[in-house]
């Protein structure tokens, strides 16, 4: 009896937490599918009319697709570069003999905790002096810097778990260091590299602060900047904001449901040896 | 003699091998170090340099006169900066407290074995994955005074009692805490989960045989054993809460009456909206020093455990 009660209580609590996690966003998704009249209705319309009015309006009046394109370019390029560099550094830190490992790991940890404002002015000035404000590389460079710690920590923690004899075996087969890395280690740690890429991509896709500073021209702005700056002429364009928000979020929600296990492992590897 | 020669040969061979390994390793890490040096460490020093000068972006003719610590003296008398500092600490304290509490609850749920656990784990991760700007707009819409969901849930169709939550200093601040707790509790949960997974089931079994109830088992087994994980979650969440920006920018713009103004937002406004690159940089330096000392404090508390485990 007591056990059954405990089970029921647990089920209720679980349901409550799941609802709390999902409902606020589902409400926004619901809003994006309404008509302008539905949005301000009281009592609120629960069932949306299924109209794509706001999506069309967001594309036509607010250049939604432009923001999507910029986000894809910036997040994609940042992920590629960060992962390439992280794989090299992660391999060295996890599996090679090397001096000052602790200091190097520690300084990466420090960078991941920097408040962005403490570097914002200088980063802006550096980019300005290169003429890279409002360019893709102008945003990709800071993103690579800020995501490197995450990428290195995750790839290093996956590399460390591979058996120690791999390099020796590869050496006996006549592989040099570079060959060992590319032909043995990376293929075996592919799931870890993928996990790191996933987390870096989500970070770069969501980042707002630097995107706001660096991309002041509309044609280069990413989705978060676009969504934050949506302005109507007389009222807030809530429907369009909800539509753009849904477009920005759905890919991430899909990634979470597809790769939940990897994300859970990757995030805890970034913090504690999992 | 021959043995000695052979010995020498292997030693030099070994040395050169390990030396080659070290050089290769340094070569692999170098690009990352360059990135971090140019776009993270150098800018910190540069911020300090800028804070000692008068730089106004809209008046380039002014050049960049060195003015010593004048900007810092101004900072001491800046009531808004002080207010932002207090707000930032209040936000850090409130949000991390609730995030750890909810994070612990979520972690305890998703650590249990039940069918559909994968889906529950994915569902609680959704807020973490949502862009903060989107979460901010979403909560801003829920807190909307005319047709927000919260007003309807509280007051039904009685429009006259609808409240403008974000126009009230206390509720605006609370709204930002709510949005942050909603968004990041699951991150704290994952770190705590990693701690929970290290506790062997036999411990609970033994306690159960000894007649310990659920609360006692939680208090004397779970809590002490996940303490390191809790501290690490606290460290990560605190550092992240210090740089709260997106929520404030979208939901309140620091208002009403600076009640939600936080350091990162204030610094942004000074440097980029008002163009006071010199004075704004003092805020950058202040934020860095504050977070750096808080993180040192935590890392002391945790011991060098994370670093040791990592290397």
Image (spheres, rainbow, N blue to C red):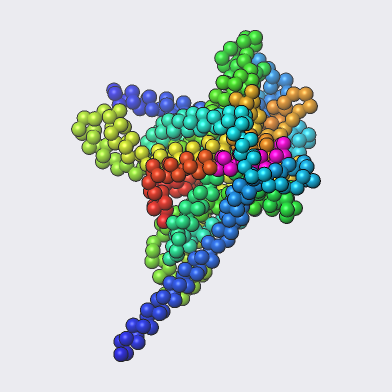
Pick the residue in front: B57 or B217: B57
Q: What secondary structure prevails in the magenta region?
A: helix
Residue B98 x %, y %: 46, 29
Q: What residue is rendered at 69% in x and 31% in y?
A: A241
Residue B285 magenta-drawn?
yes
Pick the residue in front: B32 or A231: B32
Residue A76 magenta-drawn?
no
Query: Can residue B181 be seen in the rendering of this structure?
Result: no
Q: Is residue A227 above or below residue B174?
A: below
Q: Is residue B67 above or below residue A7?
A: below
Res A54 → quadrant: top right
Residue A43 x %, y %: 63, 15
Q: What residue is rendered at 43% in x and 30% in y?
A: B101
Q: Is residue B175 left or right of residue B233?
A: right
Query: Can residue B94 be seen in the rendering of this structure?
Result: yes
Q: Is residue A147 left or right of residue B220?
A: right
Q: What residue is rendered at 50% in x and 44% in y?
A: B292
Pick the residue in front: A251 or A222: A222
Pick the residue in front: B145 or A47: B145
Q: Is residue A78 above or below residue A257?
A: below
Q: Is residue B218 left or right of residue A243?
A: left
Q: Quadrant of the N terminus of chain B?
A: bottom left
Residue A268 x %, y %: 45, 45
Q: What residue is rendered at 42% in x and 51% in y?
A: B307
The residues colored magenta run: B272-288
Q: Is residue A4 above or below residue A196?
A: above
Residue B311 x %, y %: 41, 56
């Amino acid at each position: 009896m007591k056990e059954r009660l405990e089970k029921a209580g647990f089920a209720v609590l679980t349901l409550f937490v799941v609802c709390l996690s999902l409902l606020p966003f589902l409400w926004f998704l619901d809003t994006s599918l309404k008509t302008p009249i539905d949005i301000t209705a009281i009592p609120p319309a629960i069932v949306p009319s299924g109209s794509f009015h706001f999506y069309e309006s967001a594309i036509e009046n607010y250049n939604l697709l432009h923001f999507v394109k910029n986000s894809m370019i910036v997040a994609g390029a940042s992920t590629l570069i960060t992962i390439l560099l992280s794989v090299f550094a992660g391999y060295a830190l996890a599996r090679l003999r090397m001096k000052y490992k602790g200091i190097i790991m520690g300084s990466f940890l420090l960078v991941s905790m920097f408040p962005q404002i403490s570097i914002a002015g200088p980063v802006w000035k550096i980019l300005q002096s290169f003429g890279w404000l409002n360019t893709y590389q102008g945003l990709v460079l800071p993103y690579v810097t800020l995501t490197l710690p995450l990428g290195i920590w995750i790839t290093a923690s996956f590399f460390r778990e591979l058996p120690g004899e791999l390099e020796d075996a590869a050496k006996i087969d006549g592989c040099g260091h570079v060959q060992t890395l590319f032909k043995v280690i990376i293929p075996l740690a592919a799931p870890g590299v993928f996990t790191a890429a996933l987390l870096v991509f989500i970070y770069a896709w969501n980042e707002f602060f630097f995107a706001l500073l660096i991309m002041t021209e509309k044609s280069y702005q990413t989705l978060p900047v676009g969504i934050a700056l949506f302005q109507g002429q007389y009222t807030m364009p809530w429907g369009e904001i909800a539509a753009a928000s849904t477009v920005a979020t759905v890919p991430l929600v899909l990634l979470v449901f597809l790769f939940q296990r990897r994300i859970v492992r990757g995030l805890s590897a970034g913090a504690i040896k999992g | 003699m021959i043995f000695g020669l052979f010995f020498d040969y292997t030693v030099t061979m070994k040395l050169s091998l390990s030396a080659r390994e070290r050089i290769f390793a340094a070569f692999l890490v170098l690009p990352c170090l360059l990135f971090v040096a140019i776009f993270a460490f150098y800018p910190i020093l540069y911020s300090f340099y800028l804070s000692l000068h008068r730089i106004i972006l809209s008046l380039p003719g002014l050049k960049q006169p060195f003015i010593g610590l004048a900007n810092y003296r101004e900072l001491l008398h800046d009531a808004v900066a002080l207010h932002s500092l207090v707000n930032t600490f209040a936000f850090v304290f409130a949000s991390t407290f609730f995030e750890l509490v909810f994070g612990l609850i979520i972690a305890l749920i998703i650590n249990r074995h039940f069918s559909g656990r994968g889906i529950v784990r994915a569902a609680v991760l959704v807020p973490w994955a949502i862009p903060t700007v989107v979460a901010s707009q979403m909560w801003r819409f829920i807190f909307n005074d005319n047709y927000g969901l919260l007003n309807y849930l509280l007051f039904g169709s009685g429009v006259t009692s609808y409240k403008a939550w974000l126009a009230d200093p206390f509720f605006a601040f609370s709204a930002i805490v709510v949005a942050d707790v909603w968004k990041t509790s699951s991150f704290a949960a994952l770190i705590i989960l990693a701690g929970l997974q290290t506790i062997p089931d036999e411990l609970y079994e033994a306690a159960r045989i000894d007649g310990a109830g659920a609360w006692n088992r939680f208090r004397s087994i779970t809590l002490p054993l996940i303490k390191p994980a809790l501290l690490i979650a606290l460290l990560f969440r605190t550092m992240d809460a210090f740089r709260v920006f997106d929520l404030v920018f979208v939901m309140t713009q620091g208002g009403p009456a600076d009640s939600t103004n936080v350091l990162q937002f204030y610094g942004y406004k000074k440097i980029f909206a008002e163009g006071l690159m010199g004075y704004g940089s003092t805020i950058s330096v202040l934020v860095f020093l504050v977070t750096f000392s808080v993180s040192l404090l935590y890392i002391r508390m945790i011991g060098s455990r994370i670093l040791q485990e990592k290397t």
